[in-house]
């Protein structure tokens, strides 16, 4: 840790001596982060690219995007969109441009090999950016002071990373699912918690599995009073009860719903395998599923798809690649491999695999009915969901579950921006918007694997070398 006391003492002495306050210098990236910057030219043109603009429209070929002063100045066919004189021109022949991803279920912690969690806010924010995530929401925090401090450093330009919508601590009831979460003890304790952490800078809230109906209502009331939204990974409260309580978003798509468990007791959480069995028995086109889908859409409750973690939980999937695991320490890689082998034998992995096609069917119906489907990584479970490349896994899984590439990109960019009310600024590639862009080596309209070849990620027009960031963190997560 660098010692800032000497710097502060110097400033104090200068003020005492002359009373003259010099203009604050612009914050600077640390040298290690500055080395990741590939482009910071004020005017830049990406020419002849394949463009997925994030609206869900088909890919457009031979396009030029002009970036000026951190914003998208022009987007159009290369034939009619000339780079301005003096622009740095990047020949994008054979390359693809996407909007920066806006992912909604990110965490800055990771399951360690001892059944707990390690905190990696500095590494994970950089790895998320390297994979194309230019805005993230942390969906539940185990260490909100650290998350808020990193978000501030990024906002101030002192650290490389995505813009962050930082959630407060998970709001959980008893018995807690995770020992490190605070458990609330009634509406008054909920209000106290929400008010305190909102004052500290939290801008989002997440309730967890054992929240009661009364405490969920209290959370929604307290958060909405601050103009903030609430999401939940719920269980003791059914989806319909959460909708009735005014929740804004539900995590893990349809797979946590306890609505269809026979004999479910109020405020009690049936184990996940029991819920999954009830969901597998549900007809995704039948009246009960239709009623829930309509209720979600009518009440504007968004769903967050977390296929990257589902992939690791499904029996029958091969282990994730060595490339995906690259940021992890050898101990974390070994822990993942052992857990993967175990999961192939157990019953849970088979239940998750059996529900996936049914869940995808319900998601397609939800989207067709006008529902807002978003995406997130959720790097938890038994490992293997590695911050950053989890975004690429999300894309591949959405394709596998029947979404088109333009639809998957829209879910991963524009839809999160809509939920955050930032869609006028970010989420799609259009003139006037912030220049948050992902440049892929390869043609995503021809091959889905191009998503894995992120070359440069632009945030506010500054381009970061994705591979340099990944290389800097290879093997490091889990060692500090
Ligand atoms: Zn999570």
Image: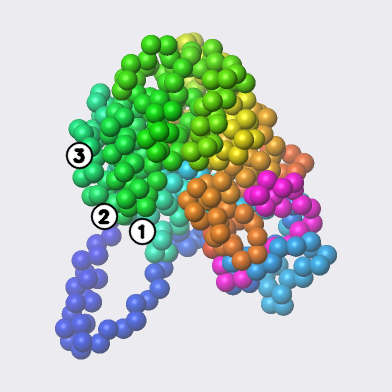
**Residue 433, image x and y in percent?**
59, 63
Instruction: Name the residue beneath numbered marker 2.
Output: 199
Percent x, y for residue 65?
69, 63
Q: Is residue 232 magenta?
A: no
Please tell me which residue lies in front, 332 or 449: 449
Residue labelled with disc 3: 189
Where in the figure is residue 210, as x and y percent of width and height? 31, 26
What residue is disc 1 on? Answer: 152
Q: Mark 2 or 3, which is nearer the eye?
A: 3
| Label 2 crowd (10 A; few <14 / some 14-19 / many >=20) | few
Q: Which residues are magenta?
A: 51-70
The numbered mark, 1 or 2, whose residue comes first in the sequence reads: 1
Q: Residue at the spot x=79%, y=63% of the render?
A: 78
Q: CA distance from mark 2 to mark 3?
A: 15 Å
> 138 or 368: nearer the eye?
368
The quarter in which the N terminus is drawn is: bottom left
Q: Is mark 2 within 8 Å of ligand 1?
A: no
Label 2: state its secondary structure. helix
**Residue 360 drawn above or below residue 418:** above
Q: Quadrant of residue 335?
A: top left
């Amino acid at each position: 840790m660098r010692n800032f006391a000497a710097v502060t003492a110097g400033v104090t002495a200068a003020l005492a001596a002359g009373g003259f306050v010099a203009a604050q210098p612009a914050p600077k990236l640390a040298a290690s982060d500055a080395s990741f910057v590939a482009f910071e030219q004020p005017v830049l043109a990406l020419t002849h690219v394949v463009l997925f603009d994030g609206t869900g429209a088909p890919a457009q070929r031979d396009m030029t995007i002009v970036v000026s002063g951190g914003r998208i100045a022009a987007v159009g066919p290369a034939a009619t969109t000339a780079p301005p004189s003096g622009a740095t021109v990047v020949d994008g022949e054979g390359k693809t441009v996407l909007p920066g991803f806006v992912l909604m279920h990110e965490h800055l912690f990771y399951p360690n090999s001892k059944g707990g969690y390690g905190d990696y806010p500095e590494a994970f924010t950089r790895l998320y950016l390297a994979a194309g995530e230019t805005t993230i929401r942390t969906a539940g925090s185990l260490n909100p002071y650290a998350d808020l401090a990193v978000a501030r450093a990024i906002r101030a330009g002192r650290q490389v990373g995505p813009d962050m919508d930082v959630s407060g601590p998970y709001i959980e009831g008893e018995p807690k699912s995770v020992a490190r979460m605070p458990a609330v003890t009634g509406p008054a304790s909920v209000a106290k918690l929400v008010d305190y952490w909102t004052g500290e800078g939290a801008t989002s809230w997440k309730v967890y599995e054992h929240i009661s109906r009364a405490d969920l209502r209290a959370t929604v009331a307290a958060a909405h009073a601050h103009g903030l939204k609430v999401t939940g990974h719920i269980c003791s409260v059914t989806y319909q009860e959460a909708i009735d309580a005014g929740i804004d978003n539900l995590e893990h798509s349809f797979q946590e719903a306890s609505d269809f468990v026979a004999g479910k007791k109020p405020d009690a959480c049936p184990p996940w395998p029991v819920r999954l069995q009830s969901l597998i028995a549900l007809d995704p086109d039948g009246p009960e599923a239709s009623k829930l889908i309509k209720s979600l859409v009518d009440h504007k409750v968004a769903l967050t798809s977390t296929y990257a973690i589902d992939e690791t939980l499904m029996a029958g999937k091969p282990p994730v690649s060595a490339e995906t695991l690259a940021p992890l320490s050898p101990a974390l890689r070994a822990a993942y491999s052992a857990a993967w082998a175990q999961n192939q034998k157990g019953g849970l992995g088979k239940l998750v695999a059996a529900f996936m096609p049914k869940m995808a069917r319900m998601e397609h119906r939800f989207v067709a009915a006008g529902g807002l489907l978003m995406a997130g990584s959720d790097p938890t479970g038994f490992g293997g969901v590695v911050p950053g490349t989890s975004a690429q896994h999300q894309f591949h899984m959405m394709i596998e579950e029947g979404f088109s590439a333009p639809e998957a990109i829209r879910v991963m960019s524009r839809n999160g921006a809509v939920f955050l009310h930032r869609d006028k600024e970010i989420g799609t590639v259009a003139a006037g918007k912030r220049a948050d862009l992902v440049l892929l080596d390869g043609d995503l309209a021809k091959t889905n694997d191009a998503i894995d070849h992120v070359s440069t990620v632009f945030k506010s027009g500054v381009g970061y070398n994705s591979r340099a960031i990944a290389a800097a963190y290879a093997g490091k997560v889990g060692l500090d």
